[in-house]
């Protein structure tokens, strides 16, 4: 019996050992399978993340192309890989240990039609092990091809964010609105507020007409809105309703650009006057008298405004053949000086000069066939000329002087510490050349002044120029001033007033936009985009037409119900607004109806181009 019991116990022990072995083998197998699955999941996640980075690289590349073809339709990509990290915004031509995106842009020319040129983008996304500087864990390549023609369509505003069935907003004021006086708005008005007493109608004369008032999601209108002085919903909003947003509306800030650091230094340009003088002599150095010195503004350049004659006194050796033109009637600013005398040609034929300057000399060479004259137009205006990019410490205009900026059909970049236009004008010339549209970009660092009746780009188009402003002092266009172009402000207050002021989009990353009191009869169309700013229009009766995006708004003053202070524009010009650097999501929608928003500006080019996995 004892032997049988021992046998059974031994057999049981063997079975236990076998069972333990089976469990161990199964455990190892399951661990290997589980570890393999985890590794596969991790590989899949890394691959998906790398694809996301590669896709973002295409987004960044297209943004770079769009930015540059706005500057120049003949933009040539650098032809080398650019490296960077998602979210940094800067892509450089040097590889780093922590980049997660690299992309290459090439352009294939079409000799028959430049619009058929093809941009090829090759983007690679990289995921690293153990952090930003770890070894490469996964990479994914993605290609994209698109024509210049389709990119131009994206720039011109054929995008889903700002087109469709929706109506353009008149006003979005995130934290609420106060109406007073007899001020009104024509069009749809929105706010995210749900807080009590944050939308205030101070009497029964203020109004929203031809539109609705949208409050924040689930806001109780009986608590959010306060009516005073006989006001009521149907009195203050006679043509519309109080509605609720489906979701919070978000209006991000565009990226403020870096200022160029490689522009040639130009010192100071001041419209102070100074005399110019010189001498005309023959090949032997003897003066030549009786030479007519024609002097005309450098622009237009083919006419003269005045003329003087070299001194004709052979007995006065030092003075014979000399000439001098004093400021005022004889010359000012940048001028073209051309000598003319029958029987002579001259070397050089002419000289362009900005006074004060001496030693403007010419050599007279006998030539019996020469008998020229230059037409004189005394109505021409003297002016100072800028013909190339540059960095100026200061540009100063006084005494009704004029500065001409020659675009030569391209992008003109002017960086200036202080742009001081106390009384004068800046005129853009040669805006279109060889079929190319030119544009001026002012990068203003410290201060901007526009006073008196000064004008900038008067009679031009708002898309001809843009001014970026980094200074901390408020910028203003008051009185009878006029600034035709868009303005992007990093932090300063923007103020307006008078009869015209700023004509063009106002983009503010700062916290206040005030007294925009344009009193012209027909307001100019513009976008005022300042989502972090308080808009003070509590006084005056001036008007603005277009979409206004702000943090909070006080609207006062005003006239009657036929003269609203903010008027929505059913067909806004979004050329400049869409061209700003909004990141991969593209520009925000300025439409009322969120249901019509089917994507961003990038959807247009995404569909028009061809993806290559």
Image (cartoon, helix red, strand yellow):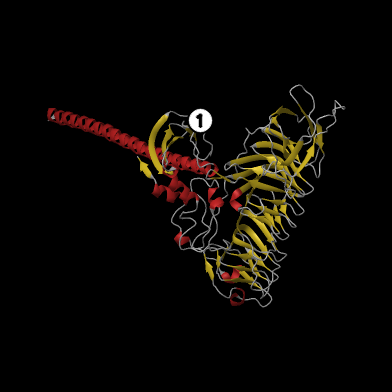
Which percent across, then down, holds residue 28?
Answer: 28, 31
Which percent across, then down, holds residue 345?
Answer: 69, 31
What residue lies at 46% left-to-right and 29% top-to-bottom?
A: 134
Q: Which residue is most to the front?
A: 368
- The quarter holding residue 233 reads bottom right
What residue lies at 39% left-to-right and 41% top-to-bottom?
A: 145
Which percent across, then down, holds residue 553?
Answer: 65, 61
Q: Which image quarter holds the N terminus?
A: top left
Q: Is residue 207 above or below residue 365?
A: below
What residue lies at 15% left-to-right and 31% top-to-bottom?
A: 8
Question: Which type of secondary structure does the marked residue at label 1 adopt?
Answer: loop
Mark 1, other Cα within 10 Å: few <14 / some 14–19 / many ≥20:
some
Q: Is residue 239 above or below residue 448?
A: below
Q: Is residue 317 above or below residue 423?
A: above
Which percent across, then down, holds residue 468?
Answer: 64, 45
Quick one: 574 or 581, which is closer to the camera? 574
Q: Is residue 18 above or below residue 488?
A: above
> Where does label 1 land, which residue?
93
Quick one: 374 or 355, which is closer to the camera? 374
Q: Which image quarter holds the C terminus?
A: top left
Q: Is residue 197 visible?
A: no
């Amino acid at each position: 019996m004892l032997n049988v019991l021992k046998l059974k116990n031994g057999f049981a022990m063997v079975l236990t050992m076998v069972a333990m072995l089976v469990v161990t083998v199964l455990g190892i197998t399951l661990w290997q399978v589980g570890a393999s699955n985890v590794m596969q999941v991790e590989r899949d996640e890394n691959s998906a993340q790398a694809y996301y980075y590669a896709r973002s690289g295409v987004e960044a590349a297209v943004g770079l192309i769009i930015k540059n073809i706005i500057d120049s339709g003949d933009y040539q990509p650098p032809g080398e890989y650019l490296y960077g990290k998602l979210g940094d915004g800067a892509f450089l031509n040097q590889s780093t240990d922590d980049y997660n995106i690299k992309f290459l842009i090439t352009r294939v020319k079409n000799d028959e039609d430049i619009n058929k040129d093809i941009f090829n983008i090759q983007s690679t996304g990289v995921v690293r092990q153990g952090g930003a500087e770890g070894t490469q864990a996964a990479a994914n390549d993605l290609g994209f091809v698109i024509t210049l023609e389709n990119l131009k369509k994206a720039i011109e505003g054929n995008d889903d964010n700002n087109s469709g069935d929706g109506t353009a907003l008149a006003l979005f004021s995130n934290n609420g609105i106060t109406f007073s006086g007899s001020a009104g708005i024509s069009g749809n008005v929105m706010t995210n507020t749900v807080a009590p007493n944050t939308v205030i109608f101070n009497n029964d004369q203020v109004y929203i007409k031809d539109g609705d008032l949208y409050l924040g999601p689930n806001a109780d209108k009986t608590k959010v809105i306060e009516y005073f002085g006989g006001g009521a919903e149907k009195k203050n909003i006679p043509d519309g309703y109080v509605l609720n947003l489906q979701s919070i509306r978000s209006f991000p800030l565009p990226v403020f650009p870096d200022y160029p650091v490689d522009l040639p230094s130009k010192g100071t340009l001041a419209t102070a006057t100074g005399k110019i003088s010189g001498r005309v002599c023959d090949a032997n150095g003897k003066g030549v008298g009786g030479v007519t010195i024609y002097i005309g503004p450098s622009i237009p350049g083919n006419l003269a405004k005045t003329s003087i004659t070299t001194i004709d006194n052979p007995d006065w050796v030092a003075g014979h053949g000399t000439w001098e033109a004093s400021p005022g009637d004889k010359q000012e600013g940048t001028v073209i000086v051309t000598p003319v005398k029958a029987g002579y040609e001259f070397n050089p034929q002419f000289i362009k000069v900005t006074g004060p300057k001496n030693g403007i000399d010419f050599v007279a060479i006998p030539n019996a066939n020469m008998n020229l004259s230059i037409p004189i137009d005394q109505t021409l205006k003297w002016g100072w000329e800028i013909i190339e990019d540059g960095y100026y410490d200061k540009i100063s205009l006084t005494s009704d002087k004029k500065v001409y900026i020659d675009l030569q059909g391209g992008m003109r970049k002017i960086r200036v510490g202080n742009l001081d236009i106390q009384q004068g004008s800046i005129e853009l010339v040669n805006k279109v050349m060889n079929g190319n549209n030119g544009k001026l970009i002012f990068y203003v660092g410290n201060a901007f002044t526009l006073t008196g009746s000064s004008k900038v780009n008067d009679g031009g188009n708002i898309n001809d120029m843009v001014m970026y402003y980094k200074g901390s002092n408020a910028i203003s266009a008051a009185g009878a001033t006029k600034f035709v172009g868009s303005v992007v402000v990093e932090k300063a207050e923007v103020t307006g007033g008078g009869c015209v002021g700023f004509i063009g989009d106002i983009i503010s990353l700062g916290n206040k936009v005030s007294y925009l009191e344009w009193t012209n009869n027909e307001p100019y169309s513009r976008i005022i985009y300042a989502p972090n700013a308080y808009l003070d229009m509590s006084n005056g009766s001036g008007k603005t037409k277009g979409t206004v995006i702000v943090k909070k708004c006080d609207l006062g003053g005003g006239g009657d119900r036929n003269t609203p202070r903010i008027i929505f524009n059913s067909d806004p010009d979004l050329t400049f607004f869409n061209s700003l650097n909004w990141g991969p999501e593209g520009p925000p929608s300025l439409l009322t109806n969120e249901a019509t928003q089917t994507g961003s500006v990038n959807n247009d080019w995404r569909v028009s181009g061809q993806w290559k996995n």
